[in-house]
């Protein structure tokens, strides 16, 4: 099953085994893998449903936070991964 990419089917079988507690680490990893695949499917669906990306159009510019006295770090560049904006109609379509 794993060779065919059927992790969810293999997971269901392992969980049904009488002493599946010895495979707890594998079960956690399999569930994490399945969740990751689901997230990738969601991203792919959003990309396919968004007319701007499917037609090669530009993405909207990201909104930069305004610097304030209480938040001077807002004027400095953000550290960490970039966040891709999603249009509201796309978010509704995939949820």
Image (tube, rainbow, N blue to C red):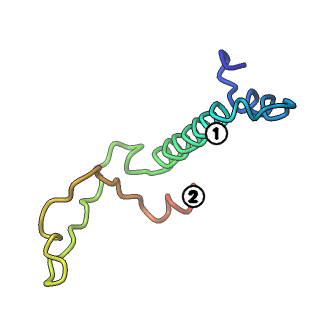
Q: Assign the C terminus to one quadrant of the image.
A: bottom right
Left or right relative to 34: residue 53: left
Q: Residue at x 21, y 55 (%)?
A: 79
Image label count: 2
Q: How far apart in space, not on screen, are marks 2 and 1 (Cα)?
A: 25 Å
Residue at horizontal 12 percent and vertical 64 percent from the top: 76
Disc number for residue 93: 2
Residue 42: x percent and y percent?
54, 46
- Picture residue at 74% right of the left edge, 27% below the top: 10
Q: Please tell me whether mark 1 sits on a helix, a strand or a loop.
A: helix
Residue at the bottom extreme, as displayed:
69
In front here: 57 or 87? 87
**Image quadrant assignment for residue 36:** top right
Q: Earlier in the sequence, mark 2 or mark 1?
A: 1
- In the picture, measured across the screen, residue 72 lies left or right of residue 3, that is left
Which quadrant, please, contains the N terminus? top right
Furthest residue in direction right, as rendered? 18
Residue 70 location, quadrant: bottom left
Q: Are there few (<14), some (14-19), or many (20+) residues within 10 Å of tag 2?
A: few
Residue 39 coordinates in the image, percent (x, y): 54, 45
Which dot, 2 or 1, sits closer to the camera? 1
> Residue 84 or 26: which is nearer the viewer?
26
With 2 as the anchor, is 93 left or right in this view? left
Dot label at residue 91: none
Q: Which residue is mark 1?
A: 31
Q: Say which element carries label 2.
A: helix
In the depicted structure, whether residue 15 falls above or below residue 63: above
- For the point 65% across and 15% down, the residue is 3
* Viewer-closest of 68 and 31: 31
Q: Position of residue 35 (x, y in %)?
A: 59, 43
């Amino acid at each position: 099953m794993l060779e065919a990419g059927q992790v969810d089917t293999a997971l269901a079988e392992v969980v049904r085994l009488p002493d599946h507690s010895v495979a707890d680490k594998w079960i956690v990893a399999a569930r994490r893998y399945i969740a990751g695949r689901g997230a990738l499917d969601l991203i792919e669906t959003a990309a396919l449903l968004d007319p701007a990306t499917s037609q090669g159009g530009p993405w909207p510019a990201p909104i930069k936070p305004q610097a304030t006295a209480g938040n001077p770090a807002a004027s400095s560049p953000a550290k960490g991964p970039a966040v891709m904006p999603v249009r509201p109609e796309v978010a509704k379509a995939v949820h």
